[in-house]
DNA sequence: CTAGGGTTAG
């Protein structure tokens, strides 16, 4: 803003930016009316933005009294709602509708990014398609990078990764945010069921996160410098590949390029190390983080949980509460998961109850999923089924599958058959469901039933994809790593790791084990490039 | 003068 502009530099605006409560905001608002500031778009937009964060209804009252709101003001209010008031998506769309009905104004490139963001999840996904049509209708090409990126993200969120990729390939000079978007889209697609059902995409298990690594390589050949967000995606891709060596490489990259080890990066690294089988490295990192938020704790508790250290997970859960951090939805998930894996059924049930009793929150679907897993795994299959039927929301396939799994382990055919029936209704094309039941029959020598299930599967036209090993991973590993000039042969990686340790010490972090941060045994050092990624990924099959 | 990207489990 030009400093000579008397409106933009009006002293009242200083007061406005300092308002923390609705009460003080109202005082400043009154002053703005008497000084005539409310007749101008810029101060009005400031007022609208702030008031919508403090009291949305007040913001709407102000907005509705504006005689002819400009597109600028509409955009301000819409974006404020989509970023600060995520539960009011409908309101954002009704404002957009008012833009469309208004003959004197037209949506512009500032209107769409926040609306696409609001379409990021159910039940708004299909609205994005209409918005895309509107972009074609109202905006001139070429679209600016904000519009392009938000569009790309929308398609990625819908699972239409190929569309997102197509859009990305149309962009000649992607900026940092655009790179980050496409990288995170590929990085987090690790579940094969997620994209096989959307067809066209490679059914190879490791395909998508691997693509993120290729793209990262490509990004490094461009002039755009990776930042924290980029590395979160890259580390996440490594985690989902179970590719420890690339993960370590990314960690080295963080240190070498002075990427800030913020909560996000820290959490991604903790989770990567624990998913790649290196719980000790995960814990070292966790321990050395100068500060930890709830997500760091979640990742670490989750790490203990999947490695079967239920008690350590619970210890950390208690420690976290003592630190004054409030558990979130994921905390409950991972902590209950920890209980489930070591058979601490009562403790797990207690945590489930505490969601409502201690924190006054309604348990969500995923919490019921944990509860059912907890009961089912421990053999209380009947009880698990009851809970599943009692829960206030409609159970999804994951829940029925969990019950089916429990029924299989504990030989409860009756429940198993019920669960399968539900599953086939929900997911008629997923081979795994049939296989689970068929294995259950096989385990008790009911071969006729095995045959019957296999036939049922055949009748539905379902084929079981054979499991594939990750032969390609090693070639790709090499390519990925050699894309960087500091060619990281195994030996070099570990030299660098020691450097990481020293650097961290310089920053005042004290590694727990001696002077070397990463203490990995000789055999693993020898063959780290292939050994870990193969072993870890194989374990996941 | 307004706008876009990241973390957790299943």
Image: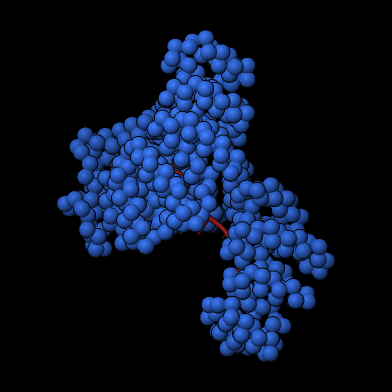
Where residue A27 appears, as percent x and y from the top left, is 61, 85
Classify residue A529 as left or right of residue A126. Answer: left
Q: Nearer the viewer, residue A170 or A443?
A: A443
x, y percent for residue A436: 49, 23
Please state the horizontal and vertical placement of residue A504, each as a whole percent of the image. Answer: 26, 58
User: Looking at this rendering, what residue extends furthest in the left direction?
Assistant: A514
Decide if residue A241 is on the left or right side of residue A532: right
Quarter occupied by residue A423: top right
Outermost residue toward the right in this view: A103
Foreground residue among A418 and A30: A418
At horizontal 48% and vertical 34% (from top left) the residue drawn is A384
- Residue A522 percent location from the top left of the image: 19, 37
Q: Nearer the viewer, residue A247 or A144?
A: A247
Q: Would residue A359 be visible to someone looking at this image?
A: yes
- Chain ID for blue: A
Residue at figure coordinates x 81%, y 69% from the top left: A104
**Looking at the image, which is closer to me, A324 or A95?**
A324
Q: Residue at (34%, 61%) from the top-left corner? A: A323
**Location of the C terminus of chain A (image quadrant):** top left
Q: Is residue A140 visible?
A: no
């Amino acid at each position: 803003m030009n400093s000579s502009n008397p409106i933009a530099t009006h002293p009242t605006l200083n007061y406005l930016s300092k308002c923390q409560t609705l009460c003080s905001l109202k005082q400043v608002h009154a002053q703005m009316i008497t000084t005539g500031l409310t007749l101008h778009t810029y101060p009005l937009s400031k007022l609208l933005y702030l008031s919508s964060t403090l009291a949305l209804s007040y913001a709407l009252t102000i907005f509705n009294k504006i005689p002819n709101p400009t597109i600028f003001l509409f955009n301000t209010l819409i974006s404020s709602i989509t970023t600060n008031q995520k539960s009011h998506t409908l309101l954002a769309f009704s404002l957009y509708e008012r833009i469309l009905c208004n003959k004197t104004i037209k949506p512009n490139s500032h209107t769409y990014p926040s609306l696409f963001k609001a379409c990021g999840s159910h039940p708004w996904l299909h609205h994005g398609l209409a918005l895309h049509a509107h972009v074609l209708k109202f905006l001139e090409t070429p679209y600016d990078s904000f519009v392009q990126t938000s569009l790309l993200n929308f398609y990625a969120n819908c699972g239409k990764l190929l569309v997102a990729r197509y859009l990305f390939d149309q962009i000649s000079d992607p900026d940092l945010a655009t790179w980050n978007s496409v990288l995170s889209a590929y990085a987090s697609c690790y579940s094969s069921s997620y994209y096989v059902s959307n067809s066209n995409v490679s059914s190879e298990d490791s395909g998508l996160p691997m693509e993120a690594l290729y793209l990262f390589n490509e990004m490094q050949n461009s002039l755009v410098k990776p930042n924290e967000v980029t590395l979160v995606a890259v580390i996440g891709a490594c985690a989902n590949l179970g590719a420890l060596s690339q993960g370590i490489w990314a960690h080295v990259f963080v240190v070498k390029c002075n990427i800030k080890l913020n909560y996000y990066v820290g959490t991604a690294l903790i989770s990567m190390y624990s998913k790649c089988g290196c719980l000790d490295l995960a814990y070292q990192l966790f321990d050395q983080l100068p500060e930890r938020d709830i997500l760091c704790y979640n990742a670490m508790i989750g790490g203990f949980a999947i490695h079967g250290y239920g008690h350590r997970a619970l210890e950390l859960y208690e420690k976290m509460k003592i630190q004054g951090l409030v558990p979130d939805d994921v905390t409950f998930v991972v902590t209950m998961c920890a209980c489930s894996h070591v058979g601490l059924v009562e403790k797990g049930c207690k945590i489930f109850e505490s969601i409502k009793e201690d924190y006054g929150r309604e348990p969500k679907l995923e919490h019921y999923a944990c509860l059912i897993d907890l009961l089912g795994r421990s053999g209380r299959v009947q009880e698990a089924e009851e809970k599943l039927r009692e829960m206030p929301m409609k159970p999804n396939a994951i829940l029925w599958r969990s019950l089916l799994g429990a029924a299989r382990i504990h030989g409860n055919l009756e429940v198993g058959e019920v669960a399968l029936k539900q599953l086939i209704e929900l997911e008629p094309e997923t081979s795994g469901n049939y296989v689970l039941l068929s294995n259950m029959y096989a385990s008790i020598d009911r071969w006729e039933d095995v045959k019957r299930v296999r036939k049922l599967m055949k009748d539905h036209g379902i084929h079981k994809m054979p499991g594939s090993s990750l032969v390609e991973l090693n070639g790709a590993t090499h390519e990925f790593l050699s894309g960087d000039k500091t060619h990281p042969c195994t030996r070099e990686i570990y030299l660098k790791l020691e450097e990481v340790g020293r650097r961290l010490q310089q920053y005042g972090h004290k590694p727990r084990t001696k002077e070397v941060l990463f203490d990995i045994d000789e055999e693993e050092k020898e063959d780290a490039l292939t050994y870990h990624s193969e072993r870890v990924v194989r374990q996941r099959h």
